[in-house]
Image (cartoon, rainbow, N blue to C red):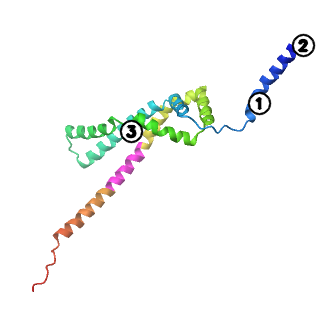
Amino acid sequence: MQTRASSLVLIVIMMSTPLLAQQVPPNNEPASRQDVLKLFDLLQVRDQTKMALENTQKQVKEMIRELFLKKLPDATPDQLSHMDSIVDDLFKNYPVEGILEDAVPIYQKHLTKADLDGVIEFYSSPLGKKLLREMPAMTAESMQACNIRIRQNMEDVMDKMEDKIEEMTKEQRKKHSSPVPRPPKS
């Protein structure tokens, strides 16, 4: 009889535990560095960052090439190759690990351990996994769509810069070509 009563009490406790857990106020325990890195691993942030940098590098190279050809339409393959190498050098040793380390305290500032646990739970679900699978394609397609707007903006900025440089050059020439007043003879 006592075993049955103990079993019944144990069953009631086990069944009510989820209900009690839901009524506990949210946990404000700060997220640890390991919590954030676990999220980064799950979200494949390292790979996503590398991929984003590669896409950015391709787009920057394309924009620089177009602007260069606009200024120098008869550019040689060597000149184009040199311009490409400048962009490549810019992105060659980009510190992905440093970027991730810099992001950890930002995530810790904005998310608690409970927040990260919830996000990790979501991205471990079938829907979260699908979102992770589709995210690279969605990001690449979004960047391509934005590229037209960015390119136009870059061209506008370059045109304004050229106009300003030309204006400044004219002013500079005017200053140097105007006669310098001589002091009166005594």
Estimate the x, y position of residue 98 in percent, counting from the top left: 42, 36
Estimate the x, y position of residue 100 in percent, counting from the top left: 46, 36
Q: Residue furthest left?
A: 186
Question: Which residue is pictured at 29% across the width and 59% down the height?
Answer: 163
Does residue 134 appear to the left or right of 14 in the view shown? left
Q: Amino acid at mark 1?
A: Leu
Q: CA distance from mark 2 to mark 3?
A: 72 Å
For label 2, the crowd category at 10 Å Cα-Cα, with few meaning under 14, some 14 to 19 and many 20 or more, is few
Q: Is residue 122 above or below residue 159?
A: above
Does residue 167 appear to the left or right of 150 in the view shown? left
Mark in the foreground, 2 or 3: 2
Q: CA distance from mark 2 to mark 1?
A: 28 Å
- Residue carrying label 2: 1
Query: Toward the viewer: 80 or 9?
Result: 9
For label 3, the crowd category at 10 Å Cα-Cα, with few meaning under 14, some 14 to 19 and many 20 or more, is some
Question: Which residue is pictured at 56% across the width and 34% down the height?
Answer: 32
Q: Amino acid at mark 3?
A: Thr
Q: Secondary structure at mark 3?
A: helix
Q: Secondary structure at mark 1?
A: helix
Mark in the foreground, 1 or 3: 1
Residue 158 among those drawn in magenta: yes
Of callouts 2 and 3, the N-terminal one = 2
Q: Residue furthest front?
A: 2
- Residue carrying label 1: 19
Does residue 33 appear to the left or right of 65 in the view shown? right
Q: Are marks 2 and 1 in contact (CB under 8 Å)?
A: no
**Badge number at residue 145:** none
- Residue carrying label 3: 56
Q: Main secondary structure of the magenta part?
A: helix
Question: Which residue is pictured at 90% across the width and 13% down the height?
Answer: 1
